[in-house]
Amino acid sequence: MITVPQQDTDPTPSPHEAIGAQLRRFRKARGLTQIELGKLINYSDSLISLIETGQRPAPLPLLQRADKVLDTCGALELLYWSTKSSTLIGGFRAYIEHERKATAFKVYELNLIPGLLQTRGYASAIIGAEARRGEIPQDKVSERLNVRMARQAVLYQEPAPSLHIVMEESCLRPVGGPFVMAEQLRRLENVAGLPHVTLQIAPSSLGENLPTVWPFTLLTSPDKKWMAYLETIQRGYVERDDENEIRSLARTYDWLQAQALSCADSLALIRTRLKEFHTMFPIAAAKPASWLKSSYSSGGGNCIEVAPGHPGILPVRDSKDPHGPQLTFGMDAWHSFITGIKSGDFGTI
């Protein structure tokens, strides 16, 4: 994993220049010339030069390949989506840059699973509801979803930041239907097992003792300074200068950490809820499905059909045996499967 240099922090007047400047920093940190990088990602050095100087927009596939070659944990793709999206609330784009560089997080959340831990299906349900309420345009849903998913690369970078999350029990309420919620709870179960993650649930039984503040995040910058991010419906803001406010939030977090369930008991509660949602299956039969031939069928002997339109899931069946057994994929699982096919992880299909 490379370390992002801290120089060249002059403001850039356009998204194209911001992406180009970041690509240049990553490339130089790896000690690569434009020609060498071009050969590694199969793009011309002349295009890379135009991108780095802000004269051409960077294609997403180029940035994705560069992320992989330069070992950036998806930083370029995240920058692409965050600069492309016009639906991010004020202050959040600035927070994303701090989030990507942070060495430690302390997150307090109520009502919703934190964005860093959301599955694609869960995030789709939340963002789709925002669009139905008129909070964001319908045609911007995918952009906001892509930003949220790209942010999660920070959990798997090397070295990984420490992440301590305290969620109120209300975060475990149903969202997106039983399959979506079951997939989300399995994600929490898996993330809780990561060595750098601590996950605790603040039980509803705390009642009036739960703080009434907004959700907030405390994060440590590479220079060991703490900062805070708070968000209202209208906007978010990063607090770096008001030490009294940061200390007050830290005291609140320490209290929450002490009063919340232990990690073991929190995981047990998540698993109990997961069992409850498993009893709600099957849901593929909840409404008639319209089956379509998948574009990833071979046209020969191995043909599959999919039934889009179910919230958070994708039923799949053998087109030559339409009355036979069906598989039901969560959207995270299906997205990962298709991504693997495109990148050749499964060989030639």
Image (cartoon, helix red, strand yellow):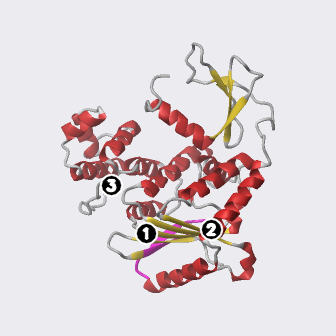
Q: Residue at x 37, y 70 (%)?
A: 221
Q: Which of the labelled discs sits on residue 234, or is there none?
A: none
- Give the percent coordinates (x, y) of residue 272: 73, 59
* Residue at disc 1, secondary structure: strand
Q: How much space separates mark 1 and mark 3, taking CA atoms?
A: 30 Å
Q: Amino acid at mark 1?
A: Ala
Magenta residues span 227-242
Q: Say whether residue 132 is visible.
A: no
Q: Which residue is mark 3?
A: 13
Q: Is residue 241 in the magenta section? A: yes
| SS label for mark 3 | loop
Q: Residue 274: horizontal and vertical position, in percent?
A: 71, 55
* Circles 1 and 3 in contact, beta carbons < 8 Å: no
| Quadrant position of residue 99 | bottom left
For the residue marked with disc 3, what is the amino acid?
Pro
Residue 67 vs 271, above or below: the answer is above
Mark 2 or mark 3: which is in front? Answer: 2
Tell me which residue sits at (55%, 24%) in the image: 296
Q: How many C-alpha atoms fall within 10 Å of the one at disc 2: few (<14), some, or many (≥20)?
A: few
Residue at numbered disc 1: 104
- Point out which mark residue 264 bears: 2
